[in-house]
Amino acid sequence: MPIIGEIKEASEIGYRSKKAWQKYIYHACIDCGKERWVQLHGGKPRSLRCRSCSKHGELHPLYGLKGELAAHWKGGQFFRNGYLWLLSPTMEHPRADKDGYIKRAIVVLEEKLGRPIKDGYDSHHKNGIKDDDRPENLEEREHGDHAALHLRERRERNLITTSPP
């Protein structure tokens, strides 16, 4: 009889898989206590609930367990396109994405200004480093001017790299 927390490879517990090396942990469902082998994903059980309980748990419609119960949970923050995104506590910030995440630069700039960023304005990194969210490096810029500034910078970089020696 396996012991809770025991880890074995798929082939050792009789699972036929293309990935015989895939590791499984003997785990008890957090709701009903049913014991079963669960695939390890990132060092954590892929699912904390058995199938019957997972139908009744708090699930994300596309990805399964949500928040701290998810195997890929990283504390409510992640990088996307060079920017650090944070989970908005209320998930109702006007600049938050559909999942409730907001760029850290926006949060820091709004704290610096003491008010929300105006509509039609963006947060701009003065030194061009996307994850340098120090208050002194951030400024509020009108969207059109901000886009034009970055377009000029891209054109200048291309002229420098494509000009003949």
Image (cartoon, helix red, strand yellow):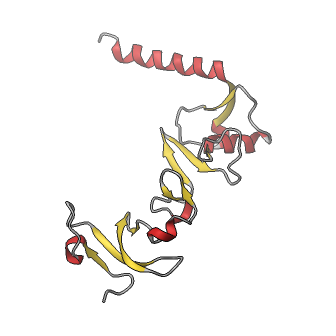
The image position of residue 71, as x and y in percent, is 45, 62
* Lateral position of residue 19 relative to residue 53, left or right: left
**Residue at far bottom of view:** 1
* Lateral position of residue 41 relative to residue 56, left or right: left
Residue placed at 49% from the left, 42% from the top?
A: 80
The image position of residue 91, as x and y in percent, is 67, 49
> Does 139 sit above or below residue 145?
below
* Lateral position of residue 21 relative to residue 152, left or right: left
- Give the quarter of the figure containing the N terminus: bottom left
Nearer to me, 53 or 87: 53
Which of the 4 quarters of the picture holds residue 112? top right
> Does 106 sit above or below residue 10?
above
Residue placed at 54% from the left, 59% from the top?
A: 59
Nearer to me, 113 or 23: 23
The image position of residue 45, as x and y in percent, is 41, 69
Nearer to me, 142 or 33: 33
> Does 83 sit above or below residue 139?
below
**Residue at far top of view:** 164
Residue placed at 38% from the left, 68% from the top?
A: 43
- Give the quarter of the figure containing the C terminus: top left
Count of numbered marks? 0
The image position of residue 56, as x and y in percent, is 56, 66
Residue placed at 54% from the left, 76% from the top?
A: 31
Nearer to me, 68 or 54: 54
Which of the 4 quarters of the picture holds residue 17? bottom left
